Image: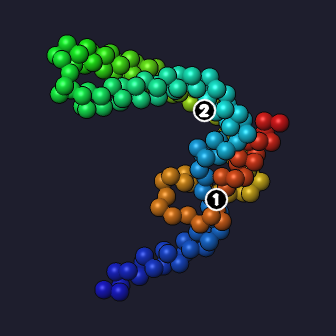
Amino acid sequence: MLKRFAPLAALWCLASPVFAELKIAVLDVQRAVLQSQEAQAFVQQVQEQLGPDETKVRKLQADAQKLQERMQKDGAIMSETERRELAEQLEEMAVNYKYLLGKLQTAQKEKQQQLLTQMNPKLEQAVREVLSEERYDLVLQRQALVFAADSIDITEKVTARLDQLAD
């Protein structure tokens, strides 16, 4: 039985020096971009632009919830006309809520795509520079791993390089 594994053992012994010299890094691309000064300024700008819409959505949701609570609480003592009017108001609020929420989510996705498009060339340059300086052989995406030691994470280095490129 040991004879069957002898070729594998020999192959492993020959390959182990190659693996010993392999320099591996881990990178969380999304975190590197979002922690950069440029991205944080962009996010702040987007929040200022979309803030009024977010406020409208939250207010409409709160108003609809109050109306629904009123229907549950006082529905038994309301006339049929009052219940129907409240139900119509509630339905109208639900339609408006769905519309405003969809509009807000679409705007957020567009802004997110705009940020990625804007940052992608800088991100590629920052990653290339860090990899060249540190001479990494292999870089793995952080999200694809079950575990990686913090000592091989280059996310902060890439973020720092992004900030340098923005200056």
Viewer-proximal residue among 28 and 89: 89
Q: Is residue 76 left or right of residue 70?
A: left
Q: Earlier in the sequence, mark 2 or mark 1?
A: 2
- Mark 1 lies on a secondary structure that is loop
Q: Amino acid at mark 2?
A: Leu
Residue under pointer 1: 153
- Residue 43 in the image: x percent, y percent? 64, 33
Q: Position of residue 128 (x, y in %)?
A: 70, 45
Residue 100 higher or lower than 118, as above or below: above
Q: Quadrant of residue 42?
A: top right
Q: Which mark is residue 84?
A: none
Question: Mark 2 highlights which residue?
Answer: 116
Q: Is residue 64 in view from this perspective?
A: yes
At numbered mark 2, what does the secondary structure look like: helix, strand or loop? helix
Q: Please state if 39 lies on the left or on the right of 74 as rendered.
A: right
* Dot 1 amino acid type: Asp
